[in-house]
Image (tube, rainbow, N blue to C red):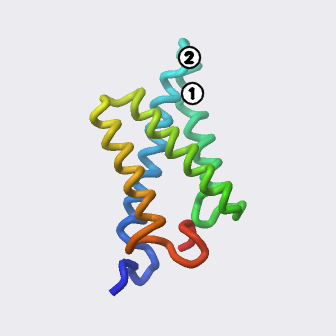
């Protein structure tokens, strides 16, 4: 029996989506701490996650506009790594470590093991 369901989505894919949403939220909260004025806080809280979502849609999403694997991996490193960094800024250290562990384990399981996306690469569904 395979780890994939009929729709081609496995449990790790669902967790990956949650990790991606968490990353956007963490980047928004961190962005909202930038600057010293209310306008800067609002702009940071909107522009930082918007940039992350735009990059993800262009390069890292399963149906990305630009299908260049290196750019997809680089985007994932920047966005998920940025979210882990943001977690250490906006969360208590224990929770930031949980976020870091979740990101690492989820990413590793996307590439290796029973939940890996075989064939055209880890981004193909």
| Nearer to me, 104 or 42 | 104
Seen in the image, is 74 located left or right of residue 1?
A: right
Q: Mark 1: few, some, or many residues within 10 Å (few <14, many ≥20)?
A: many
Q: How many numbered circles are shown? A: 2
Query: Could you tell me residue 4's position as x and y percent?
Result: 40, 79
Q: Which residue is mark 2?
A: 35
Query: Could you tell me residue 9's position as x and y percent?
Result: 43, 73
Compared with 93, 14 (above or below) is below
Q: In the figure, residue 120 lies in which quadrant?
A: bottom right
| Nearer to me, 69 or 6 | 69
Residue for point 61% across, 34% down:
47
Query: Could you tell me residue 125's position as x and y percent?
Result: 53, 73
Q: Mark 2: few, some, or many residues within 10 Å (few <14, many ≥20)?
A: few
Residue for point 53% across, 21% down:
34
Seen in the image, is 80 located left or right of residue 102?
A: right
Q: Which residue is mark 1?
A: 44
Numbered disc 1: secondary structure: helix
Compared with 55, 61 (above or below) is below
**Are discs 2 and 1 less than 8 Å apart at CB?**
yes
Residue for point 45% across, 31% down:
29
Query: Could you tell me residue 124's position as x and y percent?
Result: 57, 71
Numbered disc 2: secondary structure: loop
Seen in the image, is 81 located left or right of residue 93?
A: right
The extreme left residue here reads 94
């Amino acid at each position: 029996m395979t780890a994939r369901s009929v729709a081609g989505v496995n449990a790790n894919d669902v967790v990956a989506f949650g990790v991606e949403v968490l990353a956007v939220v963490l980047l928004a909260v961190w962005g909202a701490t930038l600057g010293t004025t209310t306008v800067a806080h609002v702009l940071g809280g909107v522009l930082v996650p918007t940039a992350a979502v735009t990059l993800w849609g262009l390069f890292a999403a399963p149906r990305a506009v630009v299908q260049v694997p290196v750019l997809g991996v680089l985007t994932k490193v920047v966005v998920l790594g940025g979210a882990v960094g943001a977690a250490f800024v906006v969360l208590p250290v224990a929770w930031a470590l949980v976020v870091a562990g979740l990101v690492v384990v989820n990413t590793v399981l996307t590439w290796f093991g029973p939940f890996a996306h075989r064939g055209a690469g880890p981004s193909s569904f």
